[in-house]
Amino acid sequence: MRERLRSARLVAVAILGFLLLNYPLLSLTDSEATVLGIPGLYAYLFAVWALLIGLIALLVRGSR
């Protein structure tokens, strides 16, 4: 049962990643704005990437 819940959560993180890295949200950050000198698109991609890795790490480590 516990393994099934972990698998469902990992699928949910994958779907969240797909949605966050898909066109409509990416186009919102594609502008001339910068975040700490980094273009907004690159800052968004890095933040989403780091968030997804952190969520996956929490899910995998928490199940041991």
Image (cartoon, rainbow, N blue to C red):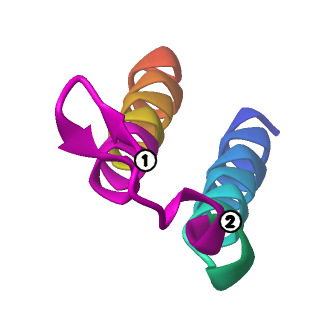
Task: Look at the numbered disc 2 and give the secondary structure of its residue.
Answer: helix
Residue behind mark 1 = 44
Identify whether 18 is placed above or below 49.
below
Q: Residue at 53% across / 30% down in the picture?
A: 59
Residue 33, image x, y percentages: 41, 45
Q: Amino acid at mark 1?
A: Tyr
Q: Residue at 82% across / 39% down in the picture?
A: 1
Residue 46 appears left or right of 17: left
Identify whether 39 is placed above or below 37.
below
Task: Look at the numbered disc 1 and give the secondary structure of its residue.
Answer: helix
Closer to us: 25 or 14: 25
Residue segment shown in magenta: 26-48
Residue 22 appears left or right of 2: left
Residue 41 picture quarter: bottom left
Q: Residue furthest left?
A: 37
Residue behind mark 2 = 25
Residue 22 picture quarter: bottom right
Q: Amino acid at mark 2?
A: Leu
Residue 27, image x, y percentages: 61, 73
- State if disc 2 and disc 1 touch (CB < 8 Å): yes
Is residue 15 located in the magenta-colored stretch of the structure?
A: no
Q: Residue at 65% across / 62% down in the picture?
A: 28
Q: Residue furthest front?
A: 32
Residue 10 appears left or right of 47: right
Identify whether 22 is placed above or below 29.
below
Q: Which mark is residue 63?
A: none
Identify whether 58 is placed above or below 34.
above
